[in-house]
Amino acid sequence: MYTRIVDGLTTTPTESLPVLGPKECALVVECCAEVQAGWPFVGGEIVEPGPDAVMEAAILDIVASYDLKRKGLKDRMAVALLQDGENEAAIRAALAAEWQQANADEELEIFSLLGG
């Protein structure tokens, strides 16, 4: 069995050696049949995730969703403020305030997952 390593994690294992496209760059390693997609590759070895892996994955999903929400909110705020005739300094101040609130919300969500 073989798997590609992308961003430090395994992809879905295959029985044959994966063929990489001309613009594709990945590390391909041999693995056992038990390996699943998403297992970490640490120190040159595939590591089976421990019991905290589910919690870590949930936290990473929350962080990713907040990043998407922030980007969409920033884009909408900037357009709305520019349409209202606000100057760039006012837009930057509004975005900074939104960023602080989003970070506070994210921290509360992560603490609630951790049982805090």
Image (cartoon, rainbow, N blue to C red):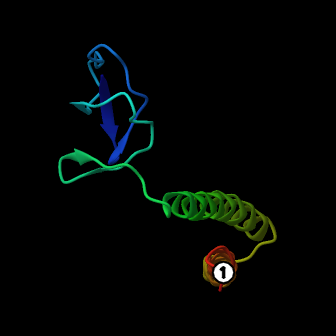
Asked which quadrant contains residue 58, the reply is: bottom right
Q: Nearer the viewer, residue 83 or 91?
A: 91
Mark 1 surroundings within 10 Å by alpha-carbon count, few (fewer than 14), some (14 through 19), many (20 or more): few
Relative to 87, is 57 above or below?
above
Position of 84 with respect to 103 (left or right) is right
- As helix, strand or loop, the secondary structure at mark 1 comes to loop
The x and y percentages for residue 73 are 72, 64
Q: Which of 59 and 35 is in front in this view?
A: 35
Q: Quadrant of the C terminus?
A: bottom right
Question: What amino acid type is highlighted by mark number 1?
Answer: Gly
The x and y percentages for residue 115 are 66, 81
Asked which quadrant contains residue 57, the reply is: bottom right
Q: Nearer the viewer, residue 70 or 86?
A: 70
Relative to 11, is 14 above or below?
above
Residue at the spot 79% in from the left edge and 65% down from the top edge = 80
Q: How many marks?
A: 1
Residue at the spot 18% in from the left edge and 47% down from the top edge = 44
Residue at the spot 69% in from the left edge and 58% down from the top edge = 72
The x and y percentages for residue 106 are 65, 75
Q: Name the residue under label 1.
A: 115
Residue at the spot 74% in from the left edge and 67% down from the top edge = 77
